[in-house]
Image: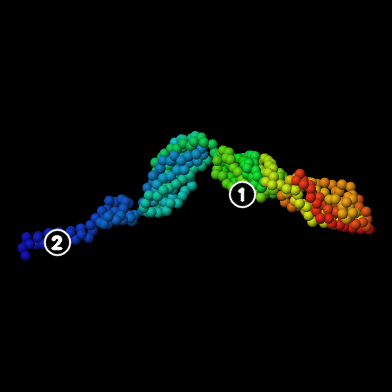
Amino acid sequence: MNKNTVIGLLVLIVVLGGGYYLINNKGIKDDSTNTPINDGTGTPVTPSTPSAPSVETVKSNSTSNSTASITGLINPNGASTNYWFEYGEGTSLGKKTAEQVLGAGYSSTPAPGFINGLSANTVYSYRLSAKNNFGVVNGAVYTLQTNNTPPAKTSPPTTQTNSAVDIERMTATLKGQVNPNGSATSYWFEYGNDKDFGHVTTYQTTNAGSSFMVVSGNITSLSPLTKYYFRLNGQNQFGTVNGATMTFTTDGPAAVSKPTVSSPTSSAVNSSSAMLGGRINANGADTTYWFEYSTDSLLGNLIGSGTAKKTVTGMNTQTIQTKVDGLNSGTKYFYRLVGKSEYGTVYSDSASFTTKK
């Protein structure tokens, strides 16, 4: 084999070897950085060497008179990373937030922070900082300014009871106004036929606000010609308040009628007194009632004017009792219940009792 042949074979070996290397290692590029490299198919490959984090402070405009919400972006670059914000008045950075754990990875991750206890209308500097086992990195410094907006009021609601409207025989609409004073507020009406109320409307809720809003509550199953007391109440996280007490009177029935009386009874009978009872319905009109009594079975010779006169009203049947005194012992008495309104006078059936000797 001559010299030229040997040289040609060596050149061929080098060319073939280089081609084989290129075919089996195509697309690989080492740029000595921690950025993803390419495997020749377009798919990023995660670096195998962790490094110090990459940090970017983000400029914030979210402030109040005493707080600031700030944020930034951090790439942990493959190592477990903690972060915090440094801040201070003017250009100083003498304070820091508590450290937060971000974890490891190779992607840019939001890093939120919150600062409180700031002074109103004051300029502050701040920056995002992060560290892992490969170093500490500080982001760019930015400034923010707190505002002068006063904090929200923290007080119970204010309530105002207004006059009732749409008053009918058995229904009415209660009205009032509520100021939540900055906090979500529940309200309701109390009502009843005396100052102890005894009934409430459904609880309703308003959104937080700082101005009065008109509220109402519908009530039903009332008694005609009856006086009712009511008030508006309000409650939020800062307390409960009661509005002033007001009154209204329901209308009378559409067709009033004379009263009805029934069921005369006697009890607690002794030698000189007895308790007389019965049932009466005023049927919507003011009604006076009393008991007539006599030793005459036909009640033709009444003793005096009967018992003391009393008054009832409304549409419900009521059980009543009256004591009669000054009776003779061992005597049989006859009695009946009388009811009288502007629509007429009615009498119950008669009954009797005998006093003790």
User: In the rendered view, would you say 20 is above or below 156?
Assistant: below
Which of disc 2 and disc 1 is earlier in sequence?
A: 2
Residue 311: image x %, image y %? Answer: 78, 46
Residue ID at (12%, 60%): 12
The CA span between labels 1 and 2 is 97 Å
Q: Secondary structure at mark 2?
A: helix
User: In the rendered view, would you say 130 is above or below 1?
Assistant: above
Q: Which part of the image, by quadrant, shows the N terminus?
A: bottom left
Task: Say left or right for 80 vs 351.
Answer: left
Q: Looking at this view, name the residue that lies furthest to the bottom.
A: 1
Residue ID at (86%, 48%): 306
User: In the rendered view, would you say 22 is above or below 73?
Assistant: below
Residue situated in front as seen by the camera: 91 or 216? 216
What mark, if any, has residue 13 been given in the picture?
2
Residue situated in front as seen by the camera: 296 or 171? 296
Residue ID at (79%, 48%): 345
Residue situated in front as seen by the camera: 41 or 206? 206
Label 1: how many Cα within 10 Å (few below 14, some 14–19, many 20+): few
**How are the colours assigned in the image?**
rainbow
Q: Mark 1 or mark 2: which is in front?
A: 1
Residue on which disc 1 sits: 202
Q: Which part of the image, by quadrant, shows the C terminus?
A: bottom right
Q: Secondary structure at mark 1?
A: loop
Residue 249: image x %, image y %? Answer: 69, 43
Task: Say left or right for 304 vs 86.
Answer: right
Residue 118 visible, this orientation: no
Label 2: how many Cα within 10 Å (few below 14, some 14–19, many 20+): few
Residue 297: image x %, image y %? Answer: 88, 55
Residue 263 visible, this orientation: yes
Residue type, label 2:
Ile
Residue type, label 1:
Thr
What mark, if any, has residue 302 been given in the picture?
none
